[in-house]
Image (spheres, rainbow, N blue to C red):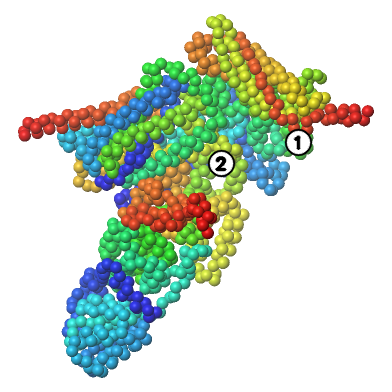
Amino acid sequence: MTQTVTKLQCAALVMTTILPTAVLILPKTVMNSVAQDAWISLLVSTLGGVVAAFALGRFAAGTKGGVPFQKGLGESTGRVLAALAGLALAAYYFSIASTALHEFITFISAEMLEYTPKIVLKGAAVLVLMYIAAKGIEPIARISVLLMLTSFPLLALSVLLTISKMTWRQIEPVGEHSWTTIALGGVTPLGWFSEVAIVLLVAPYMIRPKEAVKGAVWGVLLTGTELIVMVLQSLFVFGPNLVRSMEYSMVDLVGLIEVGNFVERVEVFFITFWMSTVFLKLGIFLFGTIHLLETTLKLPFDRSPLLLGVGLLLWADTSYNWPHDMNQDLTTGITTAMLLVCNLLFPLALAVLGRLMRANKQAEGGADA
Amino acid sequence: MRWFGHMLPFFRRSGRAKRRDSASGSRQGPRDSEDLTASLSRSLKKNLSRIRSLFGDSADLTVRELGGRPGDSEVSVLYLESIVDSDFVNRYVMTPLVEWTVGRLHGDRISRLRETLPVGRLVEMDKMGDLLTHILNGYTIVLVDGTPMGFAASTTGGERRSVEEPSSQTVTRGPKESFTESILTNMTLLRRRIKTPDLRVESFTIGRQTRTFVNILYIDGIVLEKPLTEVRDRLSRIDVDSILDSGYVEEYIQDELWTPFPLMQNSERPDAVAAGLLEGQIAIVVDGSPFVLLAPTTFVKFFQSSEDYYQRYDIASFLRIIRYISFLVSILLPSLYIAVTTFHQEMLPTPLLISLASQREGIPFPALVEALLMELTFEVLREAGVRMPRVVGSAISIVGALVLGQAAVQAGLVSAAMIIVVSFTAIANFVIPSTNMSSGARLIRFVLMLLAGTLGLFGIMSGLMVLLIHLVSLKSFGVPYMTPLAPIVWGNMKDVWVRVPWPLMKTRPIAHFQRNKIRQGNSFAVPSKHDRKKGEKSP
Amino acid sequence: MKKWGKLLAALLLLGLTTGCWDRTELNELSITSATAVDRQGDQWIVSYQVLIPSVVSGALGPMKGGAKLPITVYSTEGPTIREAIYQSALESPRTLFFSHNRVMIVGEELAKNGLDELIDVYLRNSDSRETVAVLITKGEGRKILEQLLQIQIIPGDGIRETMRTERKNFSVLPYVNMYKLAMELTSEARNAVIPEIFISGGEPVTSSDQMNKTTMSSKLKLGRLAVLKEGKLKGWLKAEQSLGANFLRDEVKRTVLSTGCGDEGGKNQSAIKILNSKTKVKPVIRGENEPIRMIVDVKAEGTLLETRCKIDLDKPEVISKLEKQMEGEILAIIRDGFKETQKLKADIVGFADLVHRKYPKRWHEMKSDWPEEYSRIKLETHVDFTLKRLGLTSKSFTKMFEQVEDEKK
């Protein structure tokens, strides 16, 4: 296990974990409940996300560098519990990977490749993901930084190109909805922000694991900023009512861009860029699954057969586990609840438990001495 | 040619270099039956007969016996006629020896003999293996009866190509010398450029049969220790019977075998190698090859031509950006064309769509097949152009351009747009300064075309993603291949997308994390306004 | 890792050789440049203007087009729009391709029935683009598609370019595309507008024989503005009224108005080009039952294009008089246009959103009753017009002519 991940890369990893799926369905989801006040909801949930990032970052920073998360957990809470936690988290990462992959391919199918069987698309995607996961966190982190650095100018460009179509006053009346409605509207995004829990896996790979806190917080802040910009952008262009009925409003937004008679219908380019971020996100989750299984099960052989097995399972699961190809999977209350539990409550419970046990041990040690 | 012989001791003993003559180990001996670690015998007769049997009475093995009847002489001289400078042997080995034997000097023969031979490089040895190595490298061996020792006098000679203009890496401005097949010449070209005792040379002999000299060069104080040890280790691990070109060495010691990207640079330009050395790279010079390897290297280095540094920085920067674009074009253009025209027609501007659609009326093949066909045709033409004698080369261009291009379009076999795409791709491929990078691009292009033909942009993106992950996970002797882009090293950006003017490049690129970072003092700083004013006042 | 590379490559190749589901070659597409949707009884009739690439590109390029026509038009019928489109498979050898569709013509009959379904089709499917321009026509939409244009080879493109030029230089009709239509229909007022297109003149030009003349017997022309309420056609605004509505919508970029000479000598004496116009609207609600007041501020700048007034434009007071008259002109246009929309009880100027934004609570009370509220709105319009330039001469030629006459005397 080499430690090469820097603070910047950590923040970029957090961004690639949260952004890709959020971008796709965010405006619709949030505006459904709070219309033009969506940005306030997002602001609130970003703040919530920062708090979560801080807490999880602190927990992650407690790791000794170079010791995998699950192993470190074993040292603080005992082997059995750590094994259970490792398996549970692996299962969680796997299910997220499966859901997001399904979501991703559904989108690709709807926007680009209508007649290609989904199972083929999913197969191709799983192959790519397996390759990404096989190469480990280091390449993912490096590319994340590149994509992050490209995403800012791209976003700025899209804002610039749609600025003539914006009606600023769509944002009014500000705060029409009550604070409770706004806060509730922020719950779903908070679920996405909670995916910052990925720092737990990343921190042991960092050159200075203590910087995981800063990385996580910056990652969430930057993600939140980009999301707010995007929500405002689609709000200004389409107005709250139209956005609610648009499945992928960001794509429609980019589809409006026209520069002269030459540059138009460029959304495929944006989709292509976005696709690369999704590949990375899914790669992170598949890597997380593999990594946790590996450290928990302490397999005697190398990573390849495990990777192959999990990859095939992912392919099968994502191909046969979904009755409909609709995009409700990531926005239901159940998914959000699962995100919050698995990403926030579960790790924090582990952290508290670990601390208590350590305190106990120390107390015992003290008694012995 | 004579002075090359004198050069040899200089670079052999320079610095703190250790000799790693792995050929002296039995592992790489020509015959397993013969124990080459065996010491020389006291008896000259025995020694001679052993050598004779080792060479199987090779016709060019010359044995001259002095001071006695043949078979019972006091001293004998051995060399391979084909690779020594015989004039030199006669004048500086034979003449003194004859005088010496005639004079019948007594006492410590060996030390007298050493003083007698007016040869710069004189090696004493007592092992049969050493003897063999030296004689095979053009040394003349002097054996004296009654001593288990011998001398090897450097008399290397033979016919060699002279230094010419580089043929594959040409520049319009800059040095016009290129390496030759002779390692000695090549060393000369490098030594002349970097006149510091810090330039260290370490020598290896690799190849059971070919016993090729492989020298590694680096500048002590700039080079980083880790890649250096890596290079040494990997070189000494090579166990093969022949090394005929630096290409052999490259494939044996590169970090990752399964990659279309070159993990080492090669250059036939001494100035480029010198520049590499000064940036902390290690040069690997292989005898018999005019291409010198440079390692560790990074992706961006393959887009830097040595001319970038001799021309003005503005045009150099512009050209460099052109090269990156050309690389992308060379990889992506045909696949993008396929993806856009068969999957995402909405992306085309209407007039272009209509014009492309009208060209495609009546074309029998799908765009993918059409593109593959034309790309393969081009590769065939290109290969033919390389293999063909130069005299008939112009025929290729006529056949290629006129017959295949124009006629194919007129016959309605391929669309004109496809010809444009394929030829632009091909030309863009030639823009990449290093051939091994451009050949990598050629291969990737075909894979991406297939992906584009099946899955459109999704396929291309999947392929690019794998490619990107592959690129960032590559390493060249421990240095991440994509430095300074991923991981990002801001300090190195001055020589990546653009080349900033020399006075502003104060430090070496720290990709290789050299110890000695500063490239230049402040005296060459860009004159600030303040300075200029001062200059005006005091003439 | 090495094994992995091989395995991946093998699997990729396996996937590659199995087939290409979404692939459509360029010569398997029929590119539509314009479509028309009509309603006949309970059937949808969709008409397509399909390009013939070889003719079009021949005409675009240096080669001569010959007598062939660049387009072909045909219609299909079905109980739903999409089914009607798929019915085309029975008669067309190629797949219809809508991404380059520039214009959508809506028949009057359909507009009366409502456009909801049409908009749904556009929002739901990724192959039909929301940027398509929408136009309405009296009678059948198909007639418009059949009309050939002379300068622009592709009629669909030609119509869109006409709309763009009109919006840029004349601003009487707004440029409406699908997403804007959807946006307006989902805004608080739920009203929208669509410009009209019609064939002016006699016999429609549908064959190349008719094309081979310098004057064509008929032309495509933009006309009035259709007003839609809740997606259904409710009435029409004349060009001038439409301009007034456009002032209120703040969509006037450049336009030309005729006005008098300041005080003396009647109307239609000089032409002024409006260059920049900015409209600000502020709703004011006083009492419970009092009508809403809308305070409209129009700031416009312009250039004098022509005049036959005998006035001396060197004098500032003359210019300010001219400006005053121009302000009155704009005011009248706005008032007329607004009155017409009030008569139709159709808020096409977006006042509903303004009220919603400023008085969110009051809005929810009056939301259901908005058409009535709207028809009672009192407009308080202030126009501020500045004549920025006079052109290259400061005196009208009529005036100069008179001066010369005077001097002669």
Quadrant showing the N terminus of chain B: bottom left
Q: Is residue A309 visible?
A: no
x and y, in percent, of residue B307 in the image: 48, 60
| Chain letter for mark 1 | C
| Chain letter for mark 2 | B
Q: Do callouts 1 and 2 point to residues on the same chain?
A: no
Secondary structure type for disc 2: loop
Q: As shown in the figure, which amino acid type bears the numbered disc 1?
A: Gln
List the single residue furthest toward the top.
Answer: C289
x and y, in percent, of residue C59 in the image: 68, 44
Q: Residue at x 38, y 50 (%)?
A: B483
x and y, in percent, of residue B94 in the image: 31, 88
Question: CB under 8 Å between callouts 1 and 2?
Answer: no
Q: As shown in the figure, which amino acid type bears the numbered disc 2?
A: Leu
Q: Residue at x 47, y 67 (%)?
A: B175
Q: Observer-nearest residue: C300 or B415?
A: C300
